[in-house]
């Protein structure tokens, strides 16, 4: 810990130099990504369309090698608590997952049963080379840890319309079923989401928007495939709305579009933090997105890809 503190102090002294080099680093990142970017072939989905329930709150999309699941809450009242009102809708067109994916299919309202069913759909028949995407924008919460696998003694949850889904269950039903050679990318845009999928590693930068930092072990669970999560905030913090949409999701979309989808994982999250920090100067919310992953060998500087 003392060595980490000394390193942090040295990095703080170099912060001004880092900021001056920021633009130059961005250009280098773009060149690196352009040289290593990849494209995926796809075909139209043959999956049978599920009937909708009159709501676009839970939708799915699929191509030959890509699947996407999007759950968002808009103007719904949760049934398990009177104080939770779900807000923060993001239009389907605002999140460009991949040009190969067809239009999303309506699955239904984001109840706990429906979300868990969609988790199963997302990883069902997954194999090496497949890419999956999960986006949740809504309420998050926490509660006392019952199996002693949390350093802070609290489990993180996402809030469905009728119940909560605990991070242990998200890991068991979703993360643990991603096979070796496949990749799951997740956005948890909700409160208390820093370790919301029980991934064992997290990147901790030396400053809020820095690409320099260290990989910290925050859990002990293992899973075979690659899972990467960007959360709306830390475990003990809250995620906010920005107008009619969720702030972190807006930042994610804005940065990806600004860099034409050519940016590394660590640079993406650093730029999202910077984007939100600038927004937060004019408002009362304060959140810092986190980058979590399930392998210490994960290359933070590789191009972000879906």
Image: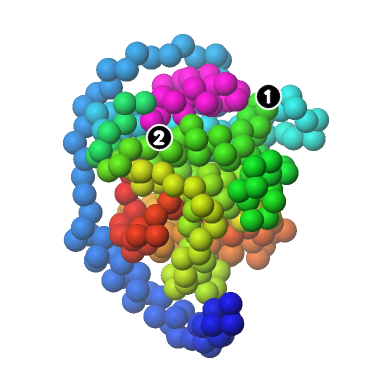
Disc 2 to disc 1, C-alpha distance = 25 Å
Q: Residue at x 47, y 70 (%)?
A: 214
Identify the residue under disc 2: 177
Mark 1, secondary structure of its residue? loop
Quarter placement of the C terminus: top left
Q: Residue at x 66, y 32 (%)?
A: 164
Identify the residue under disc 1: 162
Q: Is residue 103 above or below residue 231?
A: above
The range drawn in magenta is: 96-123
* Foreground of the two, 239 or 205: 205
Check residue 77 for magenta coloring. Answer: no
Q: Residue at x 23, y 54 (%)?
A: 37
The picture quadrant where one finds residue 156 is: top right
- Can you name the residue that lies furthest to the right here? 82
Report whether residue 156 is seen. Answer: yes
Q: Position of residue 302 (x, y in %)?
A: 30, 60
Q: Is residue 117 above or below residue 135?
A: above
The picture quadrant where one finds residue 54 is: top right
* Side of 57 where 124 appears, left or right: left
* Foreground of the two, 23 or 109: 109
């Amino acid at each position: 810990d003392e060595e980490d503190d000394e390193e942090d102090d040295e990095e703080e002294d170099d912060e001004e130099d880092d900021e001056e080099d920021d633009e130059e680093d961005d250009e280098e990142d773009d060149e690196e990504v352009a040289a290593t970017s990849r494209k995926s072939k796809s075909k139209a989905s043959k999956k049978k369309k599920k009937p909708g329930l009159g709501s676009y709150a839970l939708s799915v999309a699929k191509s030959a090698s890509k699947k996407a699941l999007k759950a968002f809450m808009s103007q719904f009242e949760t049934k398990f608590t009177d104080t939770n009102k779900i807000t923060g809708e993001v239009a389907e067109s605002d999140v460009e997952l991949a040009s190969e994916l067809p239009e999303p299919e309506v699955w239904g309202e984001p109840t706990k049963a429906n979300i868990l069913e969609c988790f199963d759909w997302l990883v069902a028949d997954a194999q090496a080379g497949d890419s999956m995407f999960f986006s949740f924008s809504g309420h998050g919460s926490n509660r006392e840890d019952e199996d002693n696998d949390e350093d802070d003694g609290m489990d993180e949850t996402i809030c469905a319309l009728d119940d909560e889904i605990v991070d242990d269950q998200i890991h068991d039903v979703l993360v643990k079923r991603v096979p070796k050679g496949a990749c799951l990318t997740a956005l948890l845009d909700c409160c208390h989401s820093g370790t919301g999928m029980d991934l064992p590693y997290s990147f901790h930068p030396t400053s809020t928007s820095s690409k320099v930092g260290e990989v910290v072990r925050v859990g002990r669970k293992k899973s075979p495939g690659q899972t990467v999560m960007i959360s709306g905030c830390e475990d003990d913090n809250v995620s906010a709305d920005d107008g009619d949409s969720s702030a972190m999701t807006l930042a994610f979309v804005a940065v990806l579009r600004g860099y034409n989808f050519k940016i590394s994982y660590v640079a993406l999250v650093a730029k999202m933090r910077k984007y939100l920090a600038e927004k937060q100067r004019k408002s009362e919310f304060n959140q810092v997105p986190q980058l979590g992953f399930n392998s210490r060998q994960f290359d933070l500087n590789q191009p972000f890809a879906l």
